[in-house]
Amino acid sequence: MGEIKVGVIGVGSIGKVHLQAYQAVPDVKVVAVTDIVEERAKQVAESFGIPRYYTDYKEMLEKEDLDAVSICTPNYLHSPMTVDALKAGVNVLCEKPMAINAQEAQKMVDAAKATKKTLMVALCWRFSDEAKTIKEFVKQGYLGDIYYAKVGILRVSGIPGMGSWFTNKDKSGGGPLIDLAPHFLDLAMWFMNHPKPISVKGYTYAKFGPLDKRRGGWGIPEPGGKFDVEDLGCAIIGLENGATIFVEMSWASNIEKDTSYCTLLGDKGGAEMMPPKIFTEMAGKYVEIIPKVEKVNLYVEEIKHFIKCIQEGTEPIPKGEEGVIDMQIIDAIYESARTGKEVRF
Ligand SMILES: NC(=O)c1ccc[n+]([C@@H]2O[C@H](COP(=O)([O-])OP(=O)(O)OC[C@H]3O[C@@H](n4cnc5c(N)ncnc54)[C@H](O)[C@@H]3O)[C@@H](O)[C@H]2O)c1
């Protein structure tokens, strides 16, 4: 297979990160970008030396002879754009969250199956050396049976794009739960081999966003736009193998500093991911093992993997079906928070 020709749809914050990453990978050429804001599409195309730009992704799919696209648009567009691209015979790398709900995510998996094209969800943390190291310890049995996991990403002041699509439930699907859980909840599920969820009890709160407090650096704010999502969500998830995951995700909270953690408890050992540590018993002692990890560019590693999967016709490490399970859990957290009841699957 020769040079892989790529188009990037949506060149706001993360779209530009994808462009930089593609330009760092051999045998790939970004030939076009699309953004609904023409000025942005033009300016980004010029600054990255990309030959053509569009304001309509369907026109780009029709006119360009693309092997792949990155979809870096607001969440509600992920599913329809992915399905259109796959049907046009183009492989897709779609940003997280996979979609605004599990039903929309399932359409993406179905389209990938029907077209036999590659669908990869951009779960960049899976490509960190931290996550790969923990996965290897799990695979080699050092943790034994993992029966409990705790994951959290908590920010002091990090509401993205106040008033933009980020804080509009119809366009985002929700707040930090849908925005951040696809990173670390997905990792816990990956380490545990994506067991089926059987029960979810969730809670959501909006204490800062409605008062226009705690804006963060990410996203493009829109004055006058609405905030109808949570700014903190948490849940307890029961899995069919008897294990439990506790999850908490927040864009804004009264805590000392921004925090993220992924903790696994197994009957032979425990693990922390940030940074990686393993806790176990050896020679009659309780020990802490500190694996040495490399700092890598998550996005370059993710895109290298996507390109390799296309070239070799192999299935990506983040599987579409796993993304659907992650979305089913997130849907259930929102439903449980809304009804006040536990969701049983
Ligand atoms: N993996 C990560 O670390 C990470 C980080 C940030 C964002 N994201 C995800 O990436 C996606 C985009 O986030 P962002 O922060 O870049 O948002 P953003 O608002 O900065 O950029 C979105 C871009 O999409 C464009 N757009 C909107 N509608 C469009 C359409 N119909 N056709 C073409 N372009 C359109 C907008 O004009 C904008 O330029 C989200 O799903 C977000 O969750 C992932």
Image (spheres, rainbow, N blue to C red):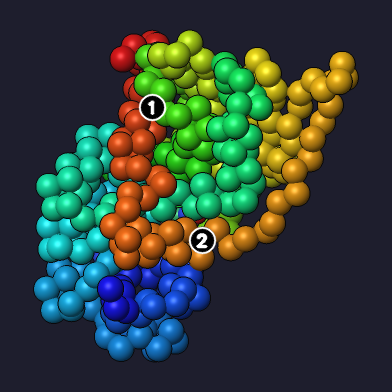
**Amino acid at the residue labelled 1:** Ile
Q: Does residue 85 appear to the left or right of 258 in the view shown?
A: left
Residue 36 screen position, x and y as percent? 27, 70
Q: Does residue 330 appear to the left or right of 247 in the view shown?
A: left
Q: What element carries label 2?
A: helix
Residue 21 higher or lower than 75, as above or below: below
Q: Does residue 338 appear to the left or right of 86 in the view shown?
A: right
Q: In the figure, residue 241 lies in which quadrant?
A: top left
Circle 2: is it few (<14), some (14-19), or many (20+) Cα within 10 Å? some
Residue 129 screen position, x and y as percent? 62, 51
Q: Does the residue labelled 1 lie within 8 Å of ligand 1?
A: no
Label of residue 301 in the image: 2
Residue 235 at least partly seen: yes
Residue 225 at least partly seen: no
Between 167 and 197, which is closer to the camera in this rendering?
Answer: 197
Residue drawn at the location 71% of the way across and 40% of the way down:
276
Between 301 and 7, which is closer to the camera in this rendering?
Answer: 301
Residue drawn at the location 35% of the way across and 85% of the way down:
50
**Amino acid at the residue labelled 2:** Glu
Of pointers 2 and 1, the one earlier in the residue sequence: 2
Q: Which of marks 2 and 1 is in front?
A: 2
Residue 308 screen position, x and y as percent? 38, 62
What is the CA distance from the residue labelled 2 to the residue labelled 1? 27 Å
Q: Can you tell me which quadrant of the image ligand 1 is in? A: bottom left
Q: In the figure, residue 311 lies in which quadrant?
A: bottom left
Image quadrant for the C terminus? top left
Image quadrant for the N terminus? bottom left
Label of residue 329 in the image: 1
